[in-house]
Image (tube, rainbow, N blue to C red):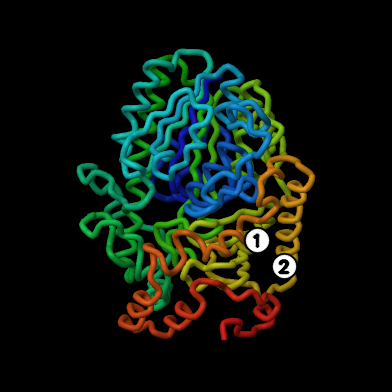
Amino acid sequence: MRILVIDCDSLRPDHLGCYGYHRETSPTIDSLAENGRRFTNYYVSDAPCLPSRTAFFGSRFGIHSGVINHGGVNAELRHRGHRRNTNTSTDGYRSLPTALRDAGHETALISPFPQRHGAWHTVDGFDRWIDTGERGFESADVTYPFAEEWLDDHATEDDWYLHVNFWDPHAPYDTPIEYGYPFEGEPAPEWPDQETLDEQYESYGLHSAREPPVWDDSLPRQPSEIGTREEYVEWIDGYDTGIKYMDDHIEKLLDQLRSAGVFEDTLIVVTADHGENQGELNVYGNHVTADDKTNRIPLIVHGPGVEEDVDGDFHYHLDLPPTLVELAGGEVPDRWDGRSFAESITDGESDGREYLVVGQGALSMMRAVRWDEWILLRTYHDGIRPLDPVELYDLSEDPHETNNLARERPDVVRKGLAMLDQWVSERLMEVVHDRNGANPDHERAPADPLWEVLHEGGPFQGKTGTTWFDKEEYAAELRETGRGVHAERVLEYEGFVPQDVEGYLNGEDVWS
């Protein structure tokens, strides 16, 4: 089987036409979805970048692998102890590319990601790793020629797995200026409206409307703040332009497959490592929470034997590796946490999970439970943002997470918290019983890595007293900009969220 995985960094599904977006950002991806299978409740188990791709390539939850952060102890895989062989490709923990290589596939990765995050374990099993060289700041015109060359050499061979990583939707929005402004004059999303922007502008938080992640003040597609609808339109045009530019180059990849006569015989997967908040929870252009917009990602599967339709079941992104291995006729490693949904792809069978628990550990410390129409956010460290210990949103009525229903629906909150507790207990019990992706031989087993990160002082890119953030400087900035009411919370709590959930649900001010 030929497998092409197109991995689009920071791509949220609702900015694609096939997921209902009104702008023509993705005609190529849309065409694959029209004649393929589209998944609407597909979530990364662990966000953002390093935790997500670690979970994907190893098909293991971060609570088992230990990787939930971008730095510190929990940016590294927990070692396997006495079970480790002379290499890491001969036991039940082996990687997705290793499992496909064992099934007879040539494997290749085209991505700067291992270098960007020091994530050498993500290279395990690839016959060839091609570093595109700019640590995630390369545009699609830089990435594409590497994929073009590889396909020129291998497209007509029988069994291969090519994983191509595009970065254009990731901030900074620096699509080559020669590409122009394809959405100039087109209606932008109606939300956030000016009233919402006014509220957000007077609030606070890293990557908020007042302090969006502007990497370079000279970039023409990124305003330095988002206080008006005009500035928001400029901002979101930059994001959408990156998606469209990437989509153009995906079309070039598909044209290569057509020219080689193998397009119809290639399983093509379009997905992402995480989504992107664009105003939700007052976060712009970043992936800092465990909410719907950061953790839900697109999944489109097109190719031979694929049942054309829409799958609305709940799946983790780490469920895709066993699915691909099964479709390729390989053996699924017995130490993976993922569950194959191959029957959904080939026969349209419903085989999703009852609910999902997803996490964030690099820019805040959160876990979320996703079930029915609900998402429950449980925050331990807010990464210097005004987040409450629990928040509840009805995504069917409130897709942008604007109305926290936790105090109105404590019954639903308690149900979600019970599911979260059950999930954590089950994962840690798997460590005790040496099952699935657990690693009981590690000296810190069965410690929950979330609490290890909190013990280190908080998420690597969200804690105070680091090169990333100085609380005194930020408090001074808040006071200078008329937002001094927020300064004391930043100084006193340093991102750590009070854990009096019952008090919060009863309407108490847990911050006082």
**Lower position in the chain sequence, tag 1 or tag 2:** 1
Amino acid beneath label 2: Val
Residue 374's mark?
1
Q: Residue at x 48, y 23 (%)?
A: 127
Residue 140: image quadrant is top left
**Residue 396 shows up from this direction:** no
According to the picture, the residue beneath numbered tag 2 turns out to be 412
Amino acid beneath label 1: Trp
Left or right relative to 4: residue 349: right
Residue 219: image quadrant is bottom left
Identify the secondary structure beneath mark 1: strand
**Residue 130 shows up from this direction:** yes
Label 2 CA crowd tier, 10 Å (few <14, some 14–19, many 20+) = some
Residue 205 position in % (x across, y down):
42, 70
Rendered position, 3 above or below 366? above
Q: Residue at x 63, y 67 (%)?
A: 392
Question: Does the CB distance between marks 1 and 2 fall below 8 Å?
Answer: yes
Rendered position, 495 above or below 509? above
Residue 289 position in % (x across, y down):
52, 60
Left or right relative to 23: residue 455: right
Residue at the far right in the pictured view: 433
Rendered position, 276 above or below 194? above
Q: Residue at x 39, y 33 (%)?
A: 250
